[in-house]
Image: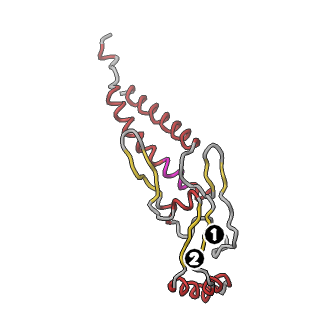
Amino acid sequence: MNKKDFPTPNFSALAKTIIKDAIIIAEKEAVNFFKESFFKQGFTDTSFQQWESRKQPDYRPGGAILQSSGHLRDSIEVANKNNNSLTIGSYAQYAKIHNEGGTLNIPITKKSRKYFWYMYKQTNNEKWKWMALSKKNHILLKFPKRQFIGHSATLIKLLDAELKKHIEKQYKNEVMR
């Protein structure tokens, strides 16, 4: 027997391939995991936390929370990446208030009153009429926390499992050459 019968795998090249592929796998899995929150109507960290229901009836009966147009869900993407880290974020301007909850103090202008009248004529919902006739100069909107993106122990476990499978597959391919 000689060395050619038992070639040594190129572990350096294998490591480079695995590192390059790991960031691609993490990107795909993380973005899909966070988008899945919209379909499950809640966020999974160590356990599933369902989103708070609406207090008022929806103008779209049966419509899912945070999914009127799908823009917020579709705005989830890779915000920053390098060889050592990956950051997933959303480019939607209103993503933070929905993800973390909070309040907004919105001034009522002539333009907004016109909009309220328009919505009243479209829907015949008294809410819009009273908003248009209101003597207030501001409306205070409270948004409950409906987290869809953030640190998740479940995601970390999922990534560990996917990366382990990928490493084993790459190792077997390299050894079988």
N-term mark: 1 or 2: 1
Magenta-drawn stretch, dominant element (helix, strand or loop): helix
Residue type pointed to by label 2 = His
Q: Position of residue 76 (x, y in %)?
A: 47, 57
Label of residue 138 in the image: 2
Q: Secondary structure at mark 2?
A: strand
Q: Position of residue 165 (x, y in %)?
A: 49, 35
Is 94 displayed left or right of 130 in the figure? left
Q: Magenta stretch containing residue 132, yes or no?
A: no
Q: Position of residue 25 (x, y in %)?
A: 44, 43
Q: Magenta stretch containing residue 32, yes or no?
A: yes
In the foreground, 119 or 34? 119
Residue annotated with mark 1 = 63
What residue is shown at x 32% (from left), y 10% (from top)?
1
In this picture, is 102 found above or below 122? above
Is 13 displayed left or right of 107 in the figure? left
Q: Position of residue 96 (x, y in %)?
A: 52, 59
The image quadrant where one finds the C terminus is top left
